[in-house]
Amino acid sequence: ITLPTLYSFISQPIENYKKNIINSRKYYNQKRYKDVISLAYKILEENKKDKEATFLLNSSLIKLAEIEKQEYRYQKAINHLSKVSPSFRNTESQIKELEELLSVQQRYDRIIDNAKLFEKGKKLFQQKKYKEALEQFLQIEPNYKDVQLFIGKTRKKLNSLAEIHYKKGVKFFIEENLKMAIKEWELTLKYNPDHQSALDYIEKAHKLMRKIKTID
């Protein structure tokens, strides 16, 4: 029996370490910070106190955050800085600055979104697609322009359409055309989901249909 030498046990981990640390240095010089971070974490899994890997990891996180900031990706920059070890650098002030920039960016994005939704809602309203228009208006911030006015106008149109279909349903019900009555009341609920009379009548119509079926 040939016993393995001590070298065979330790050579592969050492070779892996050498390879990873050399590649980490190379990637750092090439500004491939994501690759550096990935390799540094691998090294630190086996060697938690490795100073060079720790330096490369934290430095890469900071460098990557700087790039993300320049490209206006503030949340990603915050995420990277949050992973920097406090003993390496205090990043609290940088994170705070990024959070303020992110807040401004989000507010600007919301203004743009509001404008797009408002214009889309108005267009749908003009096309008499009131349900779709209301969906757009309800996504807008409540204090934006005349959105409340348009919400009111749209709901009024929807309620009006709901009543038209409700009355048609009643007419069909009286004429004992239960299937058509139910169809009209379902349209009523499409335009006004809270129309209690339509809900009650649909239940009555279904009961009558079941009763007729048992008699037949």
Image (spheres, rainbow, N blue to C red):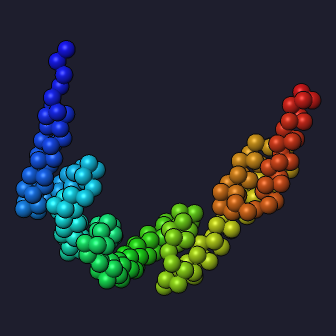
The image position of residue 210, as x and y in percent, is 86, 36
Q: Horizontal and vertical percent for residue 130?
A: 56, 66
Q: Is residue 199 above or below residue 4?
A: below
The answer to whether residue 10 of the structure is visible from this angle is yes
Q: Residue at the spot x=16%, y=47% of the render?
A: 17
Q: Quadrant of the C terminus?
A: top right
x and y percentages locating residue 6 in the rendered image: 17, 33
**Residue placed farthest to the right in the image?**
215
Count how many numbered circles sit on residues in the image: 0
Residue at (54%, 65%) from the top-left corner? 135
Closer-to-camera residue (91/54): 54
Q: Is residue 101 visible?
A: no
Write down the quadrant of residue 68 in the picture.
bottom left
Quarter of the figure with residue 84: bottom left
How far from the left and from the top, in percent, is residue 112? 37, 76
Q: Nearer the viewer, residue 67 or 133?
A: 67
Residue occupying image coordinates x 55% and y 71%: 138
Left-right relation of 21 to 199: left
Seen in the image, is 167 located left or right of residue 77?
Answer: right
Q: Tell whether 144 sits left or right of 13.
A: right
| Residue 142 shown left or right of residue 25 in the figure | right
Task: Give the residue at x 57% y 63%.
Answer: 131
Can you say whether 147 is above or below 13 in the image? below
Q: In which quadrant of the rendered image does the N terminus lie?
A: top left
